[in-house]
Each structure stands twice: as structure tokens, then as C-alpha cells.
Image: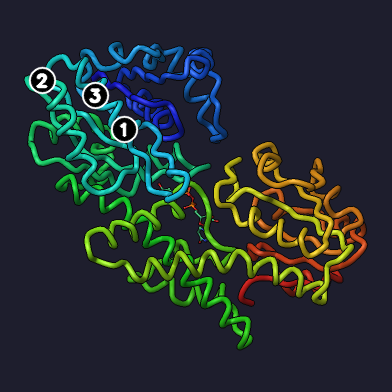
Amino acid sequence: MHIGMVGTGYVGLVSGVCFAEFGHTVICVDKDEGKINSLKNGDIPIYEPGLEELLKRQIDAGRIKFTTDISEAVKGAQAVFIAVGTPSRRYCRDADLSYVYGAAREIAENLEGYTVVVNKSTVPVGTGREVERIMREEAPDADFNVASNPEFLREGAAIDDFMRPDRVVVGTCTSRAQDVMSEVYRPLYLNKTPIVFTKRETAEIIKYAANAFLATKITFINEIADLCEKVGADVQQVARGIGIDGRIGSKFLNAGPGYGGSCFPKDTLALTRAGQKYGAPQRIVEAVISANEDRKARMADKIIAACGGDVRGKKIGILGVAFKPNTDDMRDAPALTIIPILQQAGAEVLAYDPAAMNSAKELISDVSWQDNAYDVANGSDVVAIMTEWNEFRALDLKRIRSEMSGNIIVDLRNIYNADEMLDMGFHYISIGR
Ligand code: UDX
């Protein structure tokens, strides 16, 4: 099967490479010539474990190609995916859909034979309908359907999520488009992955509802963690105690410094906007957004309180700045809120992250960036763990203790055992325990 992929950002690239791995022939197109040239050589511009190896394998197998000419990707393809960016507009944070609509026009001009045009970019409800309208206007006689196929990829685990998803959601009303989409996902279908066919608007809502629900789950356990701290309970045991109940489920119940990333903050906001627009207020999600924002700032207060309420002239070492492990992504990372508050309060901040330091340097100033966790600990009064990278789970704590000038560890990800930390002579503060 021939697949066109318009846009080689995170979603487009991961999807294109994985479709090639399924055995399809994929042509990826992007306007950015420099990016296309590197991709032709198998170099990827993003950090995603396993992606580069998979890409090189598919290039060698001749199943994936890159071009700047959209006609090459569209002509003769049975399915063309739109995976272009939908950046937040500068002042209102509404998604800017001009790239999606631009792609729709260009695809329409190049259609050849029956084609399913599939929206993979995360877009507000109703965008599929508008894409179809634009394409009909551009090419009234063309034979096509527009479907919605939201992605549920987690950064750092995207390939696994693509190859072994819990489900695939496809929004389309025609059986012709359903047949093409079944063929696209045939390898998963054979693995018995549920493929949920719905109306287009339903598929668009599923994407937002899934992310908003997960963000709500995290925010819920974060507030329970606050209560646990006040009453002497342990939030990890609470999470286990409720998560075993199949109706609740144990995933996404890790209390922490608040969610960040490219999806949850943007999608929760978009859902509340849609609620306002259509007169169906999403009050729970509105509360989640404000609780999460509040929380990030309160994490800085927690570190300051751990230092006795005053951090003037203190050295604070930060382990991890990315919004989560296995990514270099800094979008809406709690560190972006926490570090400036500590600096304003008079602290000197040292930090290390295994992958995100380059992106972080452009966003946070006056941080002394270090090469590893031990250099961060060196001379620090307090060390705060902000991202649960595996390498921070296996630190030589004796060495950390001897490098530090103080003994306070603030673990915002609960990766250590409180009793063990006490035994090692740390003053250990974590979340909700
Ligand atoms: C998310 C969704 O999981 C994915 O399906 C969607 O397509 C894109 O958004 P991602 O943003 O990559 O993926 O990361 P995820 O692992 O979901 O974590 C999001 C945020 O929630 C991170 O800041 C993480 O630290 C936080 N989180 C997650 C918690 O604080 N506690 C948890 O239990 C889980």
C-alpha cells in the first residue's frame, strides 16, 4: 500500500517510519529542505529512542522516501496523512490551523484516484469537516474522503505506542474509507488491536477527552498527595490502594510536580475553549488547568521551605529539567516555572539533564549547567530531583552525600525510599509521603 505523509515533525516522522515498518511504502514530504536532506541520510532532528535505527532500516529496505515535492507523496497514494504542526497562536494559545488547511489545498490539487485524506494533527472539533470543504472547493471532481485518526504517542515511548497501541481510533462515515484504513492498520488488526471506527467529530473529541482525562487523573492524585502530606499518609500507597480497582486503574497515578509536555497543557486548554465556544463548559478540566499551574509554582516554595524558608546565597542542584524522562522536550516543563522562582529568591542554581540541556539553555538563563549528577551535587546545599530519568534512580548516594555541602534532597518524583534516605543521613523530602 502507498501512503503519503505530509509533515515530518514528531508525529509525521514516527508515523511514517512505523507505517514503513508495517510493510507499506511511505513517501514523506516537508517544506523544510534542510530537514528532508538530513532525513534522506537517516539523520533525525528529534530525540526519540529507537527512531533513527528504525528509519535507517526502512531507508535501506526502500520502503520510505523523503521529498519536498508534495505531488510525489500524494499521486498514487491510497491514504495521505496530514501531520503538520498546529502551533498555538502567540496571544490566545488557540491552535493555528493554517498549515493544516494549506496542506489540504495542496493535497487536493494532486489527488489521483480514490484517496483517503487522514488528519493526524491534533485539531479542534470540526476541523475535519473544514478540511473536506476546502478540498471540495479546490478539486470538486476529485474522489476522496477525509478521515480523522488521532495519535496517542508518548514522547520517549512513541515507537512502542505506535506498534503496540491500546486502540486505534478512526473517524469516518464511509465504508470505502474504512476499508482503506483497515488496510493501513492491517498488521495491528491481525494482532487484535481494537480499531474503533466512529464519526469524524467523535474521533476528534476522543483525542482531547483522552488527554484531558489523563491530565485530570494526575492532578487528582497530586491534590491527594497534598492532603497525604498534611495528615501523615503515603500517596504511593493510596495510588496503589485505589489503582488496583479496575474501574480506576493504576496508570497515571504518580504524584509529582505537575504535568507538562506538548500535549496535556495544549489539549486541556483547547477542550475548555471548545466547551466555551459551544456552550458546554468543561469545568473539571478548567479546574485541572489552574491547579496544575499553581502546583508548579508551589514546588519552588516546597524547595525554599526545605531550606528553612530562605535560599539567599544557597546553592541548589537540580537533577532533570525535561518535562519527563527520555525526551529533550522542555515544553511546559515544571523546571521552567520552578528554577526562575528559586533564582528570584536569591539561590544559585546548578543543573544537569541527560538530554534536555540544549533546549533548556535557550529558555532559562543564569543556570550553571553541569556534566553529570555528581557535579551538580558538588557544593550544593540542596539537590532537587525534577525528572525521573533512570540514571537518577541508580545514583551512588554515598558519593552524592559526600559531594554536597548540605544534606537536603527534595525528590519531586518519589524515586527514592524515605527510610533508606534517612539512614544515609539525608534530610529527605518527597511528594505526598
Ligand atoms: C501524552 C499522552 O500520554 C499521549 O497519549 C499523547 O498523545 C500526548 O500526550 P506525553 O506528553 O509524551 O504523552 O507524556 P506522558 O507520559 O503522558 O506524560 C505527560 C506529563 O504527565 C509529564 O509531565 C509527566 O511527568 C506527567 N505524569 C504522567 C505525571 O506527573 N504522573 C503520571 O502518573 C504520569
Q: Residue at x 39, y 38 (%)?
A: 86
Using the rendered view, name the quadrant where residue 131 is placed. Answer: top left
Residue holding disc 1? 100
Tell me residue 100's x, y (percent): 31, 32
Going from the N terminus, do you reach mark 2 or mark 1 first? 1
| Element at label 2 | loop
Residue holding disc 2? 142
Could you tell me how far apart the alpha carbons at marks 3 and 1 are, in whole angstroms? 9 Å
Disc 2 to disc 1: CB gap under 8 Å: no
| Element at label 3 | helix
Is label 1 within 8 A of ligand 1 (CB to nearest ligand atom)?
Answer: no
Q: Which mark is residue 373?
A: none
Above or below: residue 13 compared with residue 321: above
Going from the N terminus, do you reach mark 2 or mark 3 first? 3
Tell me residue 365's x, y (percent): 74, 46
Q: Amino acid at mark 2?
A: Ala
Using the rendered view, name the quadrant where residue 414 is placed. Answer: bottom right
Q: Residue at x 55, y 26 (%)?
A: 45
